[in-house]
Amino acid sequence: MARKPVAAVVVALGMAFASPALAATEFPLRGVTVEKEVIVAATPDEAWNAFTGDVSGWWDHHFSEKPVKLVIDRVPGGGFFEIFDEEGHGVKHAEVIWAEPGKTLKMRGPLGFSGAAVDFVHTFTFTPDPAGTKIRLTLNASGQLDDEGVAALERAWDHFLVKQFQAYIAAGKHRECPVRARSTWAAAGTSCRGRSASIARRKPPPT
């Protein structure tokens, strides 16, 4: 029996399994840098601590209607987790790739663009300022981004840094324990502001 050329076999298989209802769609690749600055009335250590750990007090965008945890791990290799339920289901919005208390936080991941072919690296620096701390964001983004996507990134960080985080600090809420964390950490006998970096994967202590 004569053998068919490999290329012919591959083409034949592709035709056999191709679905006429679905077709590949090309999209342009794009790279942008988004930069933002905000000054908050707190020391660099206070600002960094409030920006990491339990962020449910100021981060108001999530996929679940009522996530049980919104946390940014304070160690490299950790993540920005949104935990949907007590069983630990949820989403990892980004991975922490640099964690230097009071100075720098870097995360890599799509955040609210989950499902799109994008690569985002967020770098946050915390430097002393006469009014407290200057937080500078440099976001390097590449991939499946159109004009609306870039505009959405601009709006998102205006919202989170100014409307949410700056106001959160100004109101002194960074000195309080977030409501969602109080019972869990009180039961564990742990100070809310002194909690461990790896709380994302913990289950609440037994009652």
Image (tube, rainbow, N blue to C red):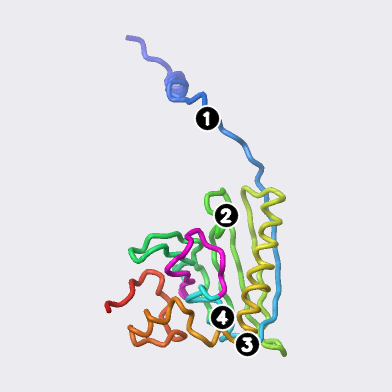
Per the image, label 2 sits on a secondary structure element best described as helix
Q: Is residue 29 above or below residue 205?
A: above
Q: Residue furthest left?
A: 206
Residue 91 in percent (x, y) is at: 45, 59
Q: Over which residues does the magenta segment extend?
A: 58-75
Residue 43 in percent (x, y) is at: 61, 88
User: Mark 1 sits on what residue?
Assistant: 22
Q: Residue at x 47, y 60 (%)?
A: 64
Per the image, label 4 sits on a secondary structure element best described as helix
User: Mark 3 sits on what residue?
Assistant: 42
The residue nearer to you, when weighing 62 against 113, is 62
Quadrant occupied by the C terminus = bottom left
Q: How far apart are labels 2 and 1 at the CA level?
A: 23 Å
Q: How far apart are labels 1 and 3 at the CA level?
A: 53 Å
Residue 3 in percent (x, y) is at: 37, 14
Point out the tag, 2 or 1, that comes first from the N-terminus: 1
Point out the tag, 3 or 4, that comes first from the N-terminus: 3
User: Mark 4 sits on what residue?
Assistant: 48
User: Mark 2 sits on what residue?
Assistant: 113
* Horizontal relation, residue 70 to residue 124: left or right: left
Point out the tag, 1 or 3, that comes first from the N-terminus: 1
Q: How far apart are labels 2 and 3 at the CA level?
A: 30 Å
Q: How far apart are labels 4 and 2 at the CA level?
A: 24 Å
Q: Which amino acid does the dot numbered 2 rest on?
A: Phe
Cβ atoms under marks 1 and 3 closer than 8 Å: no
- Which image quarter: residue 126? bottom right
Q: Is residue 71 magenta?
A: yes
Quadrant occupied by the N terminus = top left
Q: Which amino acid does the dot numbered 3 rest on?
A: Ala
